[in-house]
Image (cartoon, rainbow, N blue to C red):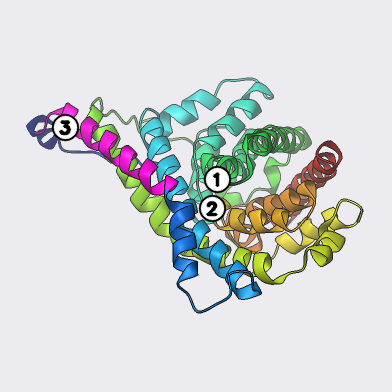
Amino acid sequence: MTEHSYAPASSETVEPWKWLAGVGAALVVWLLLYRSLIPFSEWVVARLPVDRHSHLGEALAFFIYDTPKVLLLLTLVVFAMGIVRSFFSPEQTRNLLVGHREGMANVLAAALGVVTPFCSCSAVPIFIGFVSAGIPLGVTFSFLVAAPMVNEVALGLLFGLVGWKVALAYLAFGLSIAVVAGWVIGRLGLEHWLEDWVRNLRADVSQDVSSAPMTVIDRINAGIDAVKDIVGRVWMWIIAGIAAGALIHGYVPSDTLAAIMGREAWWSVPAAVLLGIPMYSNAAGIIPVIEALLGKGAALGTVLAFMMSVIALSLPEMIILRKVLSLRLIAVFIAVVASGILAVGYLFNLLFS
């Protein structure tokens, strides 16, 4: 959530329409590449010394097709949201949350999480910034749950890979978890379970950041910077996730996976949540695995519960949050969020049976 400043001189020397034309041309190239993915992947696999319908052939076809597809989708979504976020500074974000009644503030915080992707490494400074600004603990937790789990990267990739109905349902239920979890934690009044140094923070009212209005070129540069930052940090995780998905797609029998993660197995949802906690990934890295699991007959609710657990309750994130939260508060956070994920898993299995 950092702002980038661009030298006004560079914006004045180049006419904005040239930048807009460049963006338009890039979008055309993006569309042509995206539409060529299927024939390209089939062409590559056909030239490999493997049987296309063998386990290895199926795995390679999945990997060769999904890798550029996910990276293209991720680049487009991150660029677009980088431009959108250029209209909102961190100070404006905090000011939007301060002063609202609890409940409405939880909804606003969760909604802000959708357009503010962050990973575990940036959770702590954002959390500290919100606490120091006087934002209630429950409201801060609504943001903390929504930002990694229901961000625009997850929604964009879900839409592109498994369809708009699943993406829309995931958005609705993910936001519900964030709002309810934050509200419950706020009602419990657990501010005294924060680490002492965090609880003693006070907002620095003298820090009033004023910045010159951003130009069209500045906003395009913000989108480019977002792509460099986010895609540059997660591309290895994406490829690892696609490789795992390819192995599942090519080698795991459908009957076996359906028996383990099918909707008939009542224990599959809590097992998926427990399995996801020790793992570490972001939305972009885990969604190719989700795609492969669904393609093998796993139940939608069970798979999404696994995805939510990996993203929102990962052990590495809990270790980082230990810097600012006591163990008791982390335990409450895990219990509340896990309960919401379990409810969503069972509800998805019921609705999409």
Q: Residues within 10 Å of mark 1 (few under 14, many from 20)?
A: many
Report the span colored magenta: 14-35
Q: Earlier in the sequence, mark 1 or mark 2?
A: 1
Across and down, in percent, residue 294 comes to: 72, 53
Q: Earlier in the sequence, mark 3 or mark 2?
A: 3
Name the residue: 68% across, 41% down.
191
Asked if residue 315 lies left or right of residue 298, the reply is left
Across and down, in percent, residue 244 comes to: 61, 67
Q: Amino acid at mark 1?
A: Leu
According to the picture, the residue beneath numbered tag 2 turns out to be 284
Vertical placement of residue 104 versus 43, above or below: above
Estimate the spatial distance between the alpha carbons at disc 3 and disc 2, rounded to whole Å: 32 Å
Across and down, in percent, residue 232 comes to: 38, 57
According to the picture, the residue beneath numbered tag 3 turns out to be 18
Residue 35 visible, this orientation:
yes
Vertical placement of residue 230 versus 348, above or below: below
> Regarding mark 1 in the picture, which secondary structure is present there?
helix
Q: Is 16 part of what is drawn in magenta?
A: yes
Q: Amino acid at mark 3?
A: Lys
According to the picture, the residue beneath numbered tag 1 turns out to be 157
Name the residue: 70% across, 34% down.
169
Foreground mark, 1 or 2, reads 1
